Image (spheres, rainbow, N blue to C red):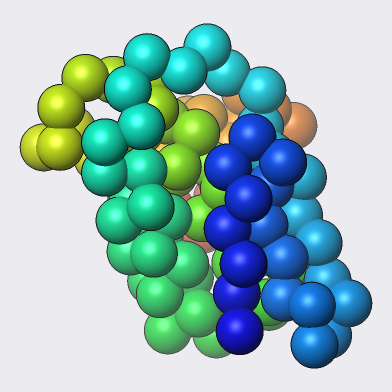
Amino acid sequence: MIIKRGSEGSEAPQYKIKAEAFRVKALDATGAGDAFDAAFLVAWKRKIGLKESLVIANAAGAIKVTRFGAHSSPTASELAEFLEKNGREDLARLFKP
């Protein structure tokens, strides 16, 4: 089970794993959960660890809330750039072409 906590991050309580949220200026939360879910599933499918998958998903959600509308989810390149700018070069490289 994954719990999304918005500005408080996310967690997998059964494993006692938490991932902090990225601090951004939120404009519109429409689609943030969908962006989180999609990024988490992509990361998990790539066999990225649970904690790291949560961090990646949090990043996707954070990017999404800085944009208006439901059709503005981040691309893999945008996700890589955001992760790199936020000190997660280790994860950013996984999404670079």
Instruction: Please give the name of the residue rendered at 88% of the width and 77% of the height, measured from the top-left corner.
Output: 16
* Residue 56 shows in the view: no
Q: Is residue 42 above or below residue 28?
A: below
Instruction: Please give the name of the residue rendered at 26% of the width and 36% of the height, measured from the top-left corner.
Output: 30
Q: How many marks?
A: 0
Q: Is residue 54 left or right of residue 62?
A: right
Q: Is residue 67 left or right of residue 11?
A: left
Residue lying furthest right = 16
Q: Nearer the viewer, residue 79 or 55?
A: 55
Residue lying furthest left = 71
* Residue 53 shows in the view: yes
Instruction: Please give the name of the residue rendered at 32% of the width and 22% of the height, measured from the top-left corner.
Output: 28
Q: Position of residue 1 (x, y in %)?
A: 61, 84
Q: Position of residue 8 (x, y in %)?
A: 72, 41
Q: Is residue 69 above or below residue 16?
A: above
Instruction: Please give the name of the residue rendered at 58% of the width and 42% of the height, measured from the top-left corner.
Output: 6
Q: Position of residue 56 (x, y in %)?
A: 56, 54
Q: Is residue 65 above or below residue 96?
A: above
Answer with the quarter of the image where residue 17 lies.
bottom right
Q: Is residue 2 above or below residue 29?
A: below
Answer with the quarter of the image where residue 50 lies.
bottom right
